Image: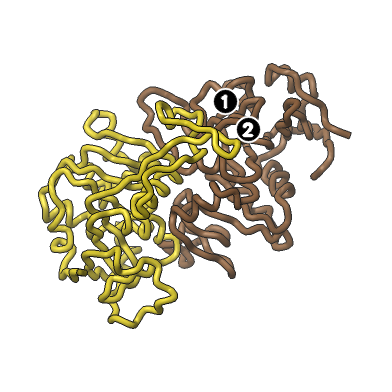
């Protein structure tokens, strides 16, 4: 795990993805959620030996397929055509979710609308009236992996923190998130509170002002 | 006893008004499009309850069935897709009832039905709006929610290869709900890309054994060129 860093600039999406990728242990079985977390796979090199799970029924998923490579029977959870790597396997949906629920998956990284300071996650609905509700595998992933991380921009478009005291959007899971990768800071959700691991273009006080509660400083 | 049908129309002719129908597929992968279209065209049954991961996209298959007003209720995990306007219209007009189920619970509830499990407890969804009103117990140090099986009158499933016994093999991620839906329905109707003779499938490689399959029809897939041409048009 990388030590405290105080960067002068907020992280780009690519830098966030790189940081999340570096924290995935060598040889881990991992599931990368739809959206931002999918880009993490660009930073998992061969030495990582990370085996990617996709909840629609595959281990050993390879990069996105392009052109002639694309096969309508081979897609990821976001329904994008992908490729298979040597050693891949296929299984039905109940087995695929048993892999999560059974606690076999080492890491999953999800996107989020909000994460609370105790690790509650809201990432499936903003509760907006008239929106078509859809949940997919979000709730199963949130409680299934040994380590559940979130990758998101820290602020909403109108500048509010998405790391919050209490989630106001409908919940996906309770006390399930333990790491949060954002453009302004990387957070560890610990029993004593939320600890900052690294700052990016923001001070500790600036971060506390933004999130609206006391944060623990980096260890060491 | 397996019935081998000559056409998709014949294969779905047994489906009756008000039935619960499971439809395999995740997005377009594994969606039994020809069986769904036969259900739309050849039989006039309506008031269907569908059990399916998605609610279709564009205006073919599942989406067309919903658009034609033949579905009164859907049990589903992810009805919203970039191009799911037919479902969206019906839902907003209050013409279709939706039971939203987390994807893993949907799969496990279907599996439980086929396996004769009366109900089960799962941590998925605990404390969320989707577990509201459901019984909760603390088991193994975790709060878990009581979930009941989902069974169906009919399942429509697509596979890659079948033999004349009804043993099935799937292809890549198109397997998705096929094996569990085949087991959870009273009558399972399968469309296969290729129908082989008995003994042509390796018994070690069979994914769905013949006991789960009731009706079978061969629907050769479009060639790659035809598929691309269809996409472009």
- Decide: is B186 above or below B121: below
Label 2 sits on a secondary structure element that is loop
Query: Is residue A43 in view from this perspective?
Result: yes
Q: Chain of mark 2?
A: A
Q: Residue at x 44, y 58 (%)?
A: A92
Q: Colour of chain A?
A: brown
The foreground one among B200 and A54 is: B200
- Chain shown yellow: that is B
**Whole-percent x and y of residue B190?**
26, 63
Is A207 situated left or right of B100 in this image? Answer: right
Q: Which is more foreground, mark 1 or mark 2?
A: 2
Q: Which residue is disc 1 drawn over?
A: A157
The foreground one among B213 and A218 is: B213
- Decide: is B131 above or below B103: above
Q: Which residue is disc 2 drawn over?
A: A153
Whole-angstrom CA distance, mark 1 to mark 2, is 10 Å
**Whole-percent x and y of residue B16?**
13, 50
């Amino acid at each position: 795990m990388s030590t405290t860093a105080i960067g002068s600039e907020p992280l780009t999406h690519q830098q966030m993805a790189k940081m999340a990728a570096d924290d995935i242990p060598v040889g881990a079985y991992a599931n990368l959620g739809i959206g931002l977390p999918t880009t993490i796979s660009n930073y998992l090199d061969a030495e990582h030996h990370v085996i990617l799970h996709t909840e629609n029924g595959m281990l050993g998923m390879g990069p996105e397929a392009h052109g002639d490579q694309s096969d309508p029977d081979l897609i990821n959870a976001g329904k994008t055509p992908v490729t298979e790597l040597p050693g891949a396997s296929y299984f039905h949906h109940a087995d695929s979710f048993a892999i999560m629920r059974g606690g076999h998956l080492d890491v999953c990284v999800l996107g989020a609308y909000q994460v609370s300071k105790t690790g509650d996650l809201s990432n499936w609905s903003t509760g907006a009236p008239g929106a078509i509700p859809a949940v997919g595998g979000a709730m199963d992933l949130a409680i299934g992996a040994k380590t559940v991380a979130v990758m998101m921009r820290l602020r909403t478009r109108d500048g509010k923190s998405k790391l919050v005291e209490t989630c106001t959007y409908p919940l996906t899971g309770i006390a399930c998130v333990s790491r949060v990768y954002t453009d302004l800071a990387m957070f560890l959700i610990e029993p004593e509170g939320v600890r900052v691991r690294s700052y990016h273009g923001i001070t500790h006080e600036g971060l506390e002002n933004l999130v609206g509660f006391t944060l623990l400083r980096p260890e060491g | 006893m397996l019935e081998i049908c000559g056409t998709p129309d014949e294969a779905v002719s047994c489906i009756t008004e008000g039935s619960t129908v499971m439809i395999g597929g995740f997005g377009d992968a594994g969606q039994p499009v020809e069986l769904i279209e036969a259900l739309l065209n050849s039989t006039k049954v309506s008031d269907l309850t569908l059990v399916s991961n998605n609610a279709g996209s564009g205006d073919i298959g599942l989406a067309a069935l919903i658009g034609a007003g033949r579905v009164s209720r859907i049990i589903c995990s992810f009805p919203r897709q970039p191009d799911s306007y037919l479902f969206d219209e019906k839902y907003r007009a209050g013409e279709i009832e939706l039971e939203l189920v987390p994807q893993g619970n949907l799969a496990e509830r279907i599996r439980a039905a086929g396996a004769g499990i009366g109900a089960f407890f799962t941590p998925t969804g605990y404390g969320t709006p989707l577990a509201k009103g459901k019984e909760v117990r603390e088991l193994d140090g975790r709060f878990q929610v009581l979930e009941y099986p989902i069974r169906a009158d009919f399942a429509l499933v697509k596979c890659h290869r079948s033999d004349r016994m009804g043993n099935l093999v799937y292809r890549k991620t198109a397997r998705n709900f096929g094996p569990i839906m085949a087991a959870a329905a009273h009558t399972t109707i399968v469309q296969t890309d290729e129908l082989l003779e008995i003994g042509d499938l390796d018994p070690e490689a069979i994914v769905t054994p013949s006991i789960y399959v009731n009706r079978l029809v061969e629907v050769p897939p479009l060639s790659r060129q035809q598929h691309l041409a269809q996409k472009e048009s």
